[in-house]
Amino acid sequence: MARLARLTLAEQPHHLIQRGNNRQPIFVDNEDRRRMLDLLGECAERFGVRLHAYVLMDNHFHLLATPSSADGLPQWMQAVGRGYVRYFNDRHQRTGTLWEGRYRSTVLQAERYLLPCMVYMDLNPVRAGLVAEARDYPWSSHAHYAGLRQDKGLTPHPLYWALGNTPFAREAAYAELVRGGISGADQSRLTDATLHGWAAGDSAFLESLQKTTVRRLHKGKPGRPVAPKKGG
């Protein structure tokens, strides 16, 4: 069965995951992580992508971003991926592939899943046992949104701005969201949607989105299609 074309839509937030081949480390040290962040910012500006959030783990990374055009996201990821592999192979004196195939992604219904997705990403290092709290991990966008540092490469989504009327109010509200965590159902929904390329949203959102693309947006029912009965 041919795999589905990747779903990328203009002016819709997307959650993306890129993994190392065979789950091998893609960041050896902090210099590697800084280079990845530089590439993400440089290429986002070039291809009209607004980067909202990120987390860099040892053997994979997550991004949350909105492209201004349907082509912007794949062009951005292609440029970042190629640039980083050239840098990584040169610096670490290696050859060959670094990535586990193409990146995985999903379109999110912003009102329902954007903030939960940011929380999900921020808590990745906690779930992995790397830190006790999201604020302790230096390689995610959490510190920016919690008011602990400034990340110039980030563009906050309007839903973040709506958390409060002042920077302090927004930062406190966001930190509280992360402390509250994410439900198991939302975590499973985001993971499954991203890994399989299905849009994440309610039925009304999917119905509206389907009018903009011929690409199927959600998993069909298992089994063969039922043929219509003949009359007579």
Image (cartoon, rainbow, N blue to C red):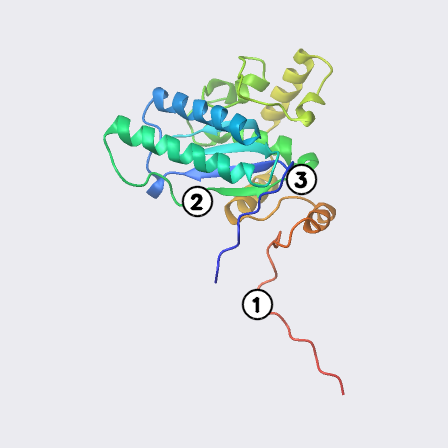
Q: Where is residue 181 in the image (x, y as percent from the top left)?
A: 59, 30
Residue 191: image location, x then y, percent:
53, 42
Residue 110 can be seen, yes or no? yes
Residue at 37% x, 31% y is: 84
Residue identified by numbered label 3 = 109
SS state under label 3? loop
Q: How crowded is mark 2: few (under 14 residues within 10 Å), some or many (20 or more)?
A: some
Residue ranking furthest to the front: 46
In the rendered structure, find residue 102 and report the number of the disc placed on it: 2
Query: Which callout, 3 or 1, points at the residue further toward the start of the chain?
Result: 3
Q: Which of marks 3 and 2 is nearer the N terminus?
A: 2
Whether pointer 1 and pointer 2 mark residues with C-beta atoms closer than 8 Å, the reply is no
Quarter of the image for residue 28 reads top left
- What amino acid is labelled 3 in the image? Gln
Neighbour tally class for label 1: few under 14, some 14-19, many 20 plus, Cα within 10 Å? few
Q: Which label is found at residue 97?
A: none
Q: In this figure, what is the number of numbered marks?
A: 3
Q: What residue type is labelled 1?
A: Gly
Q: Residue 150: x, y in percent?
A: 54, 13
User: What's the CA distance linking mark 1 and mark 2?
Assistant: 27 Å
Q: Which residue is drawn at 52% across and 32% down?
A: 63
The one nearer the camera, 213 or 228, is 213
Q: Residue 98 lies in what quarter of the image? A: top left
Q: Name the residue under label 1.
A: 223
Q: Which residue lies furthest to the bottom in this view?
A: 232
User: Which secondary structure, mark 2?
Assistant: loop
Quadrant of the rendering where the C terminus is positioned? bottom right
Labelled pair 3, 1 in contact (Cβ < 8 Å): no
Task: Look at label 2 and name its amino acid.
Answer: Arg
Marks 3 and 2 sit apart, C-alpha to C-alpha, by 23 Å
Residue at x 73%, y 47% (from the top left corner): 208
